[in-house]
Structures are given as C-alpha cells and as structure tokens.
Amino acid sequence: MAFNNRKWILCTIIWLALPSFGICEQVKIAYSNYSTSIVITNVVKAVLQEKLDYSIEMIDHPSDQLWEIIAAGKADLMVSAWLPKSHAAMQKKYQDRVDILKPVTLGIQIGFVVPTYVTIDRIDHLVQKANQFDNKIYCIKDHIGSVEMAKQAIDMYGLKGVEYVLLSEQDLLKKIEQSVKKLEWIA
C-alpha cells in the first residue's frame, strides 16, 4: 500500500486524540480499472467506512498514473502497488514522495498462466511448444511492470520468435474464453 504520509499522520493523531473533529473524514483512494485493483480497493474502502467512519472517494486512474497521483497529493492512498517487482521502477521514482506500508496481500505470484488442459507447467517447457501457442504470450496492456517482466522472461528463456500481444483486461478475458472453448493453447 502506498500513501501520502502527511495527511495520514495528521489523521492518525486526530483520530486517536480528537476523533470528533471530522477533519479526516474524507479519504481519496486511487485505483486502476483492473479487477485486482477494484476488489482490494473496495475491501479497504469497506474497512475504512465501517471501522473508522470515513467517507471514501474512489478515484479511477490508469495504472501507470497511480504513483504520480499519490505523490502529487491528488489522492491519499492506493492499495494497488505490485511490489517488490512489477512496480519497482515506480517505487524508486517516487520514493521520496510516497510511503510504503505493509503489504495488504501476501504470496501473490506473477508469471504466465495456461489453461489446465495445456500439458506444460513451466516457462522453460514453453520453448519447445511455442508454436502450439501460435508464438504469442498475451499481456494486459498498460499494466506497469508485467509487460516489462514478460519481455524479460521471453529474453531470459530464449523464446525466440515469441511475441507478446497487448490487450485490455476485458479483451484478454474474451480471448482466454474463446481459446478455452476451442481448447487452444494460450499463455
């Protein structure tokens, strides 16, 4: 979770000492329009509303702008920081203007995903079977870090001739659904 610390330090002090003043009742949470961001942001919103009686405004921004929005003070926090890897460059860029709290979720893995009927379960196995995937790996476009990590994996595992195809989350879900119906291999 990344947040702008000035408001939160003030609000914590006020909440502990003088909870009736209402200065910190409005909290702006930045999120991106990806299912993972929407779900976790709504969970945090519910906790802040129900347990601390805050009024929450959710602010939708493209994922590549979330760190900038927090650093500029246009939102108070986000819970869509994919750390330590996917958003490492953004964390480094804004490290002097954004504070990182403890993780909201742990144990999340990043990698390529294939349907259960696909008979490989490791990236290095994809090298021999790339043609069964039509030499394509699909990625969610504008998803900070994951596209770069896909490029790195393609290079690292020597997936020559394999290209990454960028789709919106909705288009990717449609592509997966179509491929699964036809039992086509997709990563």
Image (cartoon, rainbow, N blue to C red):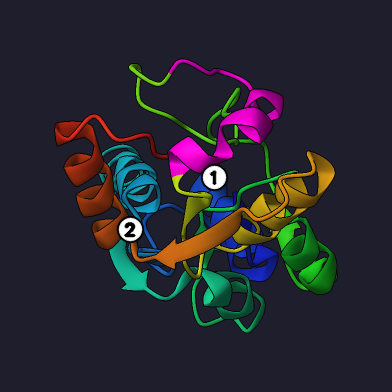
**Where does the image place residue 63, in percent across and percent down from the top left?**
50, 68
Answer whether residue 143 is visible to the viewer in this image.
yes
Of mark 2 and mark 1, the one earlier in the sequence is: 1
Residue at 73% x, 67% y: name it.
Answer: 90
Of circles 2 and 1, the one toward us is 2
Determine whether 108 is above or below 119 in the image: below
Q: Residue furthest left?
A: 181
- Which residue position is annotated with label 1? 16
Magenta range is: 119-133
153 or 57, nearer to the observer: 153
Residue 146 figure quarter: bottom right
Residue at 58% x, 59% y: name it.
Answer: 163
Q: Is residue 84 left or right of residue 163?
A: right
- Which residue position is annotated with label 2? 169
Q: Is residue 112 left or right of residue 181?
A: right
Residue 176 figure quarter: top left
Q: Label 2, label 1: how many angstroms apart (C-alpha)?
A: 41 Å
> Given the image, on which type of amino acid does mark 1 rest?
Leu
26 or 4, nearer to the observer: 4
**Label 1: element kind:** helix
